[in-house]
Amino acid sequence: MKRSSVSKATLGRLPKYLGFLKGISDKYISSAAIARDLSLGEVQVRKDLSSVSGRGKPKIGYLKSDLISSIEKCLGNNTLTNAVLVGAGKLGKALLDYRGFEEYGVKIIAGFDSNEAIVNEKENILPMSEFEDFCKKENVHIGIIAVGEGSAQGVCDLMLKNKIKAIWNFAPCKLKIPDDIIFVQENLALSLAYLNNQLSNNF
Amino acid sequence: MKRSSVSKATLGRLPKYLGFLKGISDKYISSAAIARDLSLGEVQVRKDLSSVSGRGKPKIGYLKSDLISSIEKCLGNNTLTNAVLVGAGKLGKALLDYRGFEEYGVKIIAGFDSNEAIVNEKENILPMSEFEDFCKKENVHIGIIAVGEGSAQGVCDLMLKNKIKAIWNFAPCKLKIPDDIIFVQENLALSLAYLNNQLSNNF
């Protein structure tokens, strides 16, 4: 099993590089020129690009077309990965509504909720009873859990049963998950806690 | 200016320690016992606690009451820090609605929006025209930006003008901010990008 060496911070800069590369006419481009144009550190740009596309040629840099396709491959831009979300409360709706995910190669193709009053086909919020059939029909690889703490493990188990391979959990609880499943635990409160901790140490 | 040595990861575990400590009757407690009860690594617990409260006594551990007050101080639990949010769209409402922030010492006391149709005093969403007076009256230290890219810098400038010292930005854009302001840029898409990148390298 090959683990990727691309960090979250690097991933965050890739769309910026991509936008820049697509806007220039040069055939070759150096990391120094990219750093200058995007006001980034040269060392950082060199490190980012080498983790995605190996080293450029000395004194020439990267063949632009190669670099673009390496970045696109890394971001999965060529083939959007399908994600589904369970729990269409305020947070779930905000995530369904967010248009920035496709830039990073992921599309949330539907939300699901057990509350019939929230179900709304126009907004792509479907009843839980359709979850299994939907996952079978569509090629869903990523599951987003935006339900409360009490329902999260059940939703997670259902996702894994339906061949979802990666889980993004917003519920504030530990989940039992097999080792081969890719997992990110989101905790929005942590950013605020960090700000608050820094505040009390600085002022 | 003293910088805190408490990492985000440690901050994330502090409420767990606090809950555990408040639930036991012992006068002294060792990091080994805490690790065992919370299914955490002993080295990690020792590191977490020493960054918050120094080292425990050899063979005895920590005086529980001291440890509790150190953790509470670090989380700012004794005095909630007031935060305001600007931009009460779906994401903004989800944040206003979230009850987990107080556990980390922060309270979002009001949201603001320039769209009159969204303003709703019952839900604590006030018109932008009241922002400056509100900040003057209440003791607001943290500002959360949940507006679109185009309005973010203006909102940020307004927050700084009103003596807000820490900014949490959800708008997907770089902000011009003085060095002495504490700042966290949130990018939810990055977690999804990370999952996707790991998926494409593992399956």
Image (spheres, coloured by chain):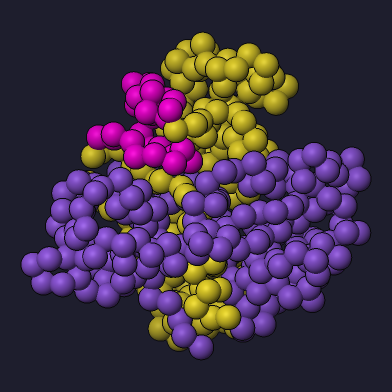
Chain colours: A purple, B yellow
In front of the other: A27 or A192: A27
In front of the other: B12 or A186: A186
In front of the other: B172 or B88: B172
> In this rendering, is residue A4 above or below A152?
below
In front of the other: A116 or A59: A59
Residue at the (74%, 52%) spot, across then down: A110
> In this rendering, is residue A160 above or below B74?
below
Residue A140: x percent and y percent?
A: 70, 66
The quadrant in which residue A57 appears is bottom left
Residue A168: x percent and y percent?
A: 62, 63
Please check the rendered image and state whether residue A19 is part of the magenta-colored stretch, yes or no.
no
Residue at the (75%, 51%) spot, across then down: A111
> In this rendering, is residue B152 above or below A43?
above
The quadrant in which residue B36 appears is bottom right
Residue B177: x percent and y percent?
A: 29, 35
Residue A62: x percent and y percent?
A: 22, 65
A164 vs A121, left or right, is left
Residue at the (34%, 39%) spot, across then down: B174
Q: Which residues are magenta?
A: B150-178
> In this rendering, is residue A144 above or below A196?
below
B31 vs B50, left or right, is right
